[in-house]
Amino acid sequence: MDKTIIVVADLGHFKAYRITQGPMESPRVTMIESYDSIEGHGKLVDKLSDMAGRFGRGGKERAAMASGERHNIEIETEKRLIKMIAKNIDSIITGEKCEVWHLAVAKKINRQVTDKLRPEVKAKLDKNITADLTSIDRSEILTYFT
């Protein structure tokens, strides 16, 4: 029986499917992992606990809105999420012992994710689609990879 893995992800969602097909059978799609990342959702301002600078101080200090800088929090969060996605892919592909797998990751982060994959996992990557398919129903996922 052939076994292929399909991984779809964006910064807020991750889904992995096992596709199995025996002789004289239609392919079966089984979800093997799914999670939503809280960090990948919502606005940054809603996630920060330090709310200094949200409102003006008035008077002569009106221009001084914030008491500190963001220090690239958004960029660091994105890097951490990309690293987590790549690590999860490495773990699934290695654990499932599949020979080929397919990937669909949002265009904005696709290259960054594939660059972080272990070489032996990346070597088994058969199809890579730069699209966010995280909201596609499980029954439709195969149509994007055939």
Image (cartoon, helix red, strand yellow):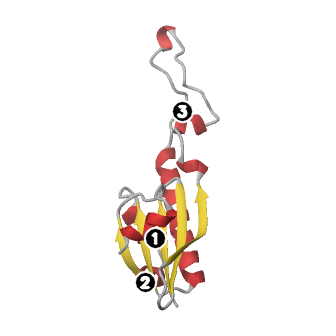
Kindly state the secondary structure of the residue where label 2 is placed.
Answer: loop
Look at label 2 and name its amino acid.
Answer: Lys
Residue 123, compared with residue 49, is above or below; it is below
Look at mark 2 in the image and give the residue it sits on: 124
Residue 138 placement, left or right of 127: right
**Earlier residue among tags 3 and 2:** 3
Kindly state the secondary structure of the residue where label 1 is placed.
Answer: helix
Residue 5 placement, left or right of 115: right
Q: Nearer the viewer, mark 1 or mark 2?
A: 2
The residue depicted at 50 percent of the width and 22 percent of the height is: 65
Look at mark 3 in the image and give the residue it sits on: 68
Look at label 3 and name its amino acid.
Answer: Gly
Q: Are marks 3 and 1 in contact (CB under 8 Å)?
A: no
Look at mark 1 in the image and give the residue it sits on: 116
Q: Position of residue 24 (x, y in %)?
A: 47, 89
Q: Nearer the viewer, residue 44 or 7?
A: 7
Q: Quadrant of the C terminus?
A: bottom left
